[in-house]
Image (cartoon, rainbow, N blue to C red):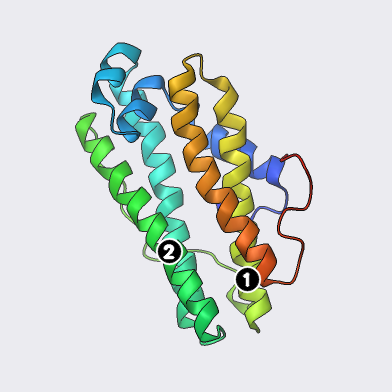
């Protein structure tokens, strides 16, 4: 089952954290935030960090493919298509940074799969594509929400929270595009 096809945020978080062996190490998050000096102080095991980051990279590559599917579906109106491509661009930037970080750690970045198991038959209207995208963004929010409190170093938690914030904004905008309340509650779960 794909990370992005999870039905509940909690199960998405468990799957992401479980697959990655995670939690992102301090060194990995520091590298992701562009702070190599902080990464050196944080320590960590390079092989573990590369494996964890490759899991995150795999999820980003899957998100890129999911947004591509939506873009090519011909179900999206122009403003929604522009939004989807914008979010896909964010995921491409994340993937590029993750791949470079894996290489810095001496690892080999994972490649995109040739095919993902997306619910293509269920995508019959723009709303279906938006719901699919919102679900994958909600899963990403949930995964980062589970990771942030696990950091002992507050600077590293801030770096992970920054990524969480981007995913939460995507989710809120997609909910609003669906005509739903953009922020459904005062607390994330």
Q: Residue at x 30, y 12 (%)?
A: 41
Task: Out of 177 and 9, give the one closest to the viewer.
Answer: 177
Disc 1 + disc 2, Cβ < 8 Å: no
Q: Position of residue 50 (x, y in %)?
A: 32, 31
Q: Which residue in the structure is indicated by mark 2?
A: 88
Task: Out of 114 and 147, give the one closest to the viewer.
Answer: 147
Q: Position of residue 60 (x, y in %)?
A: 43, 52
Viewport quadrant of the C terminus = top right
Q: CA distance from mark 1 to mark 2?
A: 13 Å
Up-down: is 120 above or below 14? below
Viewport quadrant of the N terminus = bottom right
Query: Residue 130, located in which quarter of the rendered image?
Result: bottom right
- Number of on-image labels: 2
Q: Residue at x 30, y 30 (%)?
A: 31
Crowding around mark 2 (Cα neighbors within 10 Å: few <14, some 14 to 19, many 20+) is many
Up-down: is 184 above or below 79? above
Q: Residue at x 59, y 64 (%)?
A: 133
Q: Which mark is residue 130?
A: 1
Up-down: is 14 above or below 153? below
């Amino acid at each position: 089952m794909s990370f992005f096809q999870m039905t509940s945020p909690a199960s998405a978080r468990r799957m992401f954290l479980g697959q990655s062996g995670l939690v992102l190490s301090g060194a990995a998050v520091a590298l992701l935030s562009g702070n190599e000096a902080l990464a050196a102080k944080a320590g960590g095991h390079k092989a573990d960090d590369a494996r964890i980051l490759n899991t995150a990279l795999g999820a980003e590559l899957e998100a890129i493919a999911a947004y591509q599917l939506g873009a090519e579906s011909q179900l999206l109106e122009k403003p929604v298509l522009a939004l989807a491509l914008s979010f896909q661009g964010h995921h491409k930037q994340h993937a590029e940074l993750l791949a470079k970080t894996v290489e810095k750690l001496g690892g080999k970045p994972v490649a995109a799969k040739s095919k993902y198991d997306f619910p293509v038959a269920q995508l019959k209207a723009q709303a279906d594509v938006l719901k699919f995208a919102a679900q994958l963004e909600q899963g990403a929010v949930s995964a980062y929400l589970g990771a942030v409190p696990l950091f002992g170093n507050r600077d590293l938690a801030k770096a992970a929270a920054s990524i969480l914030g981007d995913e939460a904004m995507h989710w809120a905008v997609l909910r609003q595009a669906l005509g739903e309340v953009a922020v459904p509650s005062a607390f994330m779960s």
